[in-house]
Amino acid sequence: MSRRRFVVYSLAASTLTVAAPLGCDTSSAEGADGSPESARKPSGVVVRGADDEMLVLQVTATNKVIVRLPRVEVGQGITTAVAMMIAEELDARLVDVDIPLADARDKGNQYTGGSSSVSSLYGPARQLAATARARLVTAAARRWHLPARTLRTRDTMVIAPDGRTATYGSLTASAAGIHRPAVSSKPKPPSRHRVIGRPTTRIDARDIVTGKAKYAGDLSVAGAKPTVVARPPTIMGKVVSVDDRAARAMQGVRAVVRVPGGVAVVADTFHHAFKARDALRITWAPGPLAPLSDAAIRARLRAAVPRLGTPPRGSAQTEAEFEFAFVSHAPMEVLTAVADVRAHRAEFWFSTQTPMDARDSIAEAIGLPKSKVRVHVVRGGGSFGRRLNFDAAIEAALISQKAHRPVKLMWSRGDDIRHGRMRPASHHRIRASLARGRVVAFAHSMASVNESSVQQGTAAQGGVTTTAAARTARAPAAGPLPSDDGLYNFGRVSKDSGGVGLAMPLGAWRSVDSGTTRTAEEIVVDEVAKRLGKDPVAFRRTTLRNKAVKAVLDKVATAGNWGRTMPAGQAQGVAVHEEYGSCVACLVEIDATDPKNPRVTKVVMGADVGTAVNPRGLEAQLMGTAIDGISTVLRAGLHIDRGAVRESSFSDFRYARGRHAPLHFEAHIMPSRRDPGGAGELGVPAAAGAVANAYARATGTRPRRFPVNF
């Protein structure tokens, strides 16, 4: 089937169902293969593969509009954004639109990441709803014997000129048989949008605050018992021996099993499980990183940074080196997975950004065909990239298989901080070459820790090991840094990267490479401006290539009163970033009178993301990125002490709390009618760079190691 075609088919006599290929354009609706034969498929027949490869909209007899979303909701508000797209084109009430999450499919794209969800769904979702609306209007016109063009749609119903109304639910059966609507099925132009672009409260907000929203830990799956794992003191340590007699004798304990990551306890409650876990007597072999601590890792990273090359003849150099620590994702909801593994089938419930990959990897781990493994995607309480990996689900599968019963596995906060995925540490070397009052060349080389493995048992000095339990997505190998396509007019721009392979669990943390590379570059931009005797905002304005970036910079400079006089120990900082077809600027004010306890007092952000489907949701995303920037620049990082992560909870992994949040925050969304770009990760680099620059100006220092209070 061409990606340019839409499919209309009936799941049942009472249901209109419209399917749209993801990534399609706004061409007219046709049958499954565009032929008259496929368009006349009888009620009750489902076009093979359609539900796997497409976005599917269903109008029910109860006047509900259901779209089973092939993405995951992890707090970013994607279900609300898609509901708004559907409500806009269908002229439906938002309360009548339901966006459940789709199970893992056999085909298609279910990836949630890369700030791509809204942009990838914007066209298909709108066309889907517009196609359904055209058929519903046509069905009403036939019922009333009126020209379809005379009818209006509003509040999930069709309205006749004489005031008669028909709910979509009452029309769905007849609409299911219509294949050539009498009115246009083209989406509305932006000028007619009444829902898209209007600040909207999340459709699940009440459920979240009242506890009605269900996460994996809330699910009651028949027979699934609470489960926890005793884990080694060092990263990827191994069980040498275990005495579980005391644990097995304790009240409520159902099973004790060994898995690659440690020793699991299955019990009647989590209280019983944790008590029994603490009663285990385990002898551990140290992990492969036991000889290493922070200083040694930093030294290796510094040595792995590629040389910068020769600067242009006659130029003066501004050079700097930066270190960024490991960082935990630390979503508020800890990792939880429910697993029910039987001899010939398996079923799972957990939050995942990559359900198809998760299903395939689970099937391989437990030795079942993937067709016998079903994965139900559950909403997640935060992710920031953590749920791209599915460590907990694979572990739950192995425990369920060995214990011969369903389990509900929960990783504690300490489990995930000490043994979960983390943002790699990195080292950056930057040189700006100056001549004739401007930058004529800009070079940036960096090295980051890459996840690597060798065969088990070969750990020697600097050697590494891994286990099947740690097998999920790998960190990217070293290579050239991604190009920013010349954000600044800095002459010849060169970028390169190296890596240090270590056996440790790494993962994509919100904004991935940009959160460190752009931060470092924005600090250097400030230092170049100072060396040239120019104001940081004015210097950026004269060197930025993109008018949209200049516009958001101007917006925050004006709104934030850039350049105002501030007391000693306080200062402003600014930074910009461009990615995902969007751009952002951030202005920060900081009170660093006590450099060891700085407080960001004000954040002003401006963003151009194209069409902002839900400006209120975008504002929340930007607010979150501001907290990320404050945290990772000032306070939050992970130490490695002889192969172990020192931190274990929010008491020592010092993410920003309420008392560290800015007293004033504002977000300015630039008006636009172009299609949406990405926004979820966009603000992190600008926020981090602005915080670092504000701290530098307030303290009169040149921060080089982050977080600065580490």
Image: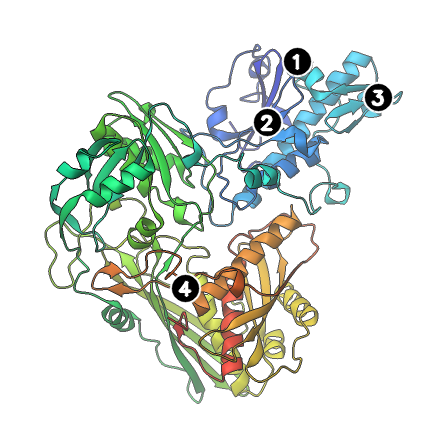
Q: Mark number for residue 636? A: 4
Q: Position of residue 458 (x, y in %)?
A: 10, 54
- Label 2 vs 1, first from the N-terminus: 2
The amino acid type, in three-letter code, at marker 2 is Ile
Label 4 crowding class (10 Å Cα cut-off): few <14, some 14-19, many 20+? many
Query: Foreground: 367 or 443?
Result: 367
Placement of 382 over or under 570, stated as above or below: above
The earlier-in-sequence mark between 4 and 2 is 2
First in sequence: mark 3 vs mark 1:
3
Q: Amino acid at mark 3?
A: Ala
Asked where in the image residue 89 lies, by quadrant, the reply is top right
Residue 488: x and y in percent read 54, 71
* Amino acid type assigned to the residue bearing label 1 in the image: Ala
Question: In what quadrant of the picture does the C terminus appear?
Answer: bottom left
Is any atom of residue 483 visible in this view? no
User: On the image, numbered disc 3 is attached to which residue?
Assistant: 160
389 left or right of 27 in image: left
- Kind of element beneath mark 4: loop
Left or right, 664 with reference to 273: right
Rounded to the nearest angstrom, the CA distance separating label 4 from label 1 is 56 Å
Which numbered disc, 4 or 1, marks the residue that appears first in the sequence?
Answer: 1
Dot 1: within a 10 Å radius of its alpha carbon, few (fewer than 14), some, or many (20 or more) residues? many
Quickly name the residue at label 2. Answer: 66
